[in-house]
Amino acid sequence: MPFLPRDFVIPEPLATDEFMLTPLRVDHLVLDYEAVMSSRERLWQLFGPGWGWPRADMTLMQDLVDLGWHQKEFQLRQSFNWAVMSPDQRTLLGCCYLDPSDRPGFDAEAYYWARSDRIADGLEDRLAAVYRAWVAAAWPLQRVAWPGRDQPW
């Protein structure tokens, strides 16, 4: 069974007064690399068990390859990855991901993170609330897993 129905129209990216989701692209490279590497220890706690990411020695070139892969998967409708951008587009605040699932009983897996320097002000909690509601309302998915959050890795 395909991840999404062929005739499903991908929703417009999510936007609030505080942030906007835009498809992750290679032109986010410098902002993405800075956000990931400045938040690496926390990201490893969140995603390391499942993805082994991000490695301490990840290079800018390796991040470029990852971003190119994410961009292509989005174009092919195989998975969806968004940069969480500040309204002025100058700061990458985090990322959100929506992937097909191979877990029994789930048709998708969703992930999100906010940069470490924004955890104390509650950005990740606000992002989680808005992103979860958007996935539930705008995507034709019956059961979404949230590994590392609601389900263990």
Image (cartoon, helix red, strand yellow):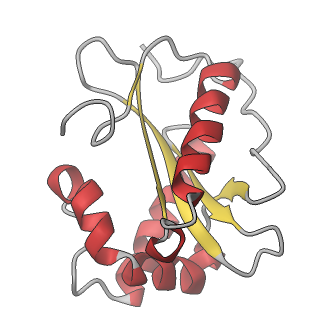
- 59 horizontally vs 80: left or right: left
Rendering coords of residue 143 (x, y %):
43, 15
Q: Is 140 or 113 nearer to us in this picture?
A: 113
Q: Identify the residue at horizontal 83%, vertical 75% (top origin).
A: 88
- 23 horizontally vs 68: left or right: right
Task: Report the number of numbered marks.
Answer: 0
Question: Quadrant location of the N terminus?
Answer: top left
Q: Is 105 or 76 nearer to us in this picture?
A: 105
Residue 37, visible in the rendered structure: yes
Question: Quadrant location of the C terminus?
Answer: top left
Which quadrant holds residue 43? Answer: bottom left
Rendering coords of residue 134 (x, y %):
67, 31
Q: Is 27 or 56 nearer to us in this picture?
A: 56
Q: Is 108 or 116 nearer to us in this picture?
A: 116
Q: Identify the residue at horizontal 23%, vertical 15% (top origin).
A: 104
Please, is residue 112 above or below residue 25 in the view?
A: above
Q: Identify the residue at horizontal 75%, vertical 45% (top origin).
A: 13
Residue 71, visible in the rendered structure: no
Please, is residue 114 above or below residue 144 in the view?
A: below
Rendering coords of residue 82 (x, y %):
60, 54
Rendering coords of residue 32 (x, y %):
53, 76
- 28 horizontally vs 49: left or right: right
Q: Identify the residue at horizontal 60%, vertical 49% (top origin).
A: 127
